[in-house]
Image (spheres, rainbow, N blue to C red):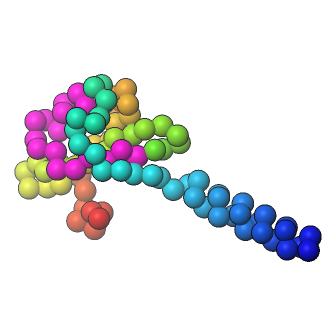
Amino acid sequence: MRARYLSFFAAAIFLGCQQEGREKSTEITLTDVPPAARAALERETGGERITRIEREDEGGRPVYEAEYTKDGKTWSVEVDENGKVLESEQEDDEDRD
């Protein structure tokens, strides 16, 4: 009986650790983005139309990633809630979901 409980406990810990490393992401609109982050996204996209915005939790902190098209190429920019740019890159066709 004790071995059964230990097996169950070990499985629960294993599954919990797997979930911990995953990012939660939710598609949102620009009006859902905090003002500082929204201003940074608008500045970084240079007035181009934003086609998609996701809110992700990375390390327990909200991060906002926007996709936009410029000169026929898809770009993404990632900012934190304070408007700090964390990443900006051109997307490969293979990167897109």
Q: Is 72 covered by the magenta stretch?
A: no
User: From where the camera sits, is residue 44 visible?
Assistant: no
Residue 77: quarter of image: top left
Which residue extends farthest right?
2
- In the image, residue 16 lies at what x, y percent? 65, 58
Q: Is residue 6 above or below residue 75?
A: below
Q: Is 39 covered by the magenta stretch?
A: yes
Say which residue appears at 57% left-offset and 58% top-offset.
19
With 74 as the anchor, is 18 left or right in this view? right
Which residue extends farthest left?
71
Q: Which image quarter is the N terminus in?
A: bottom right
Say which residue appears at 17% left-offset and 50% top-offset.
51
User: From where the camera sits, is residue 36 visible?
Assistant: yes
Viewer-nearest residue: 65 or 90: 65
All told, the count of numbered labels is 0
Say which residue appears at 18% left-offset and 33% top-offset.
42
With 2 as the anchor, is 35 left or right in this view? left
Q: Which image quarter is the C terminus in?
A: bottom left
**Which stretch did the figure color magenta?**
38-56
With 84 as the anchor, is 61 left or right in this view? right
- In the image, residue 84 lies at what x, y percent? 35, 29
- In the image, residue 20 lies at what x, y percent? 59, 53
Q: Is residue 93 above or below residue 37?
A: below
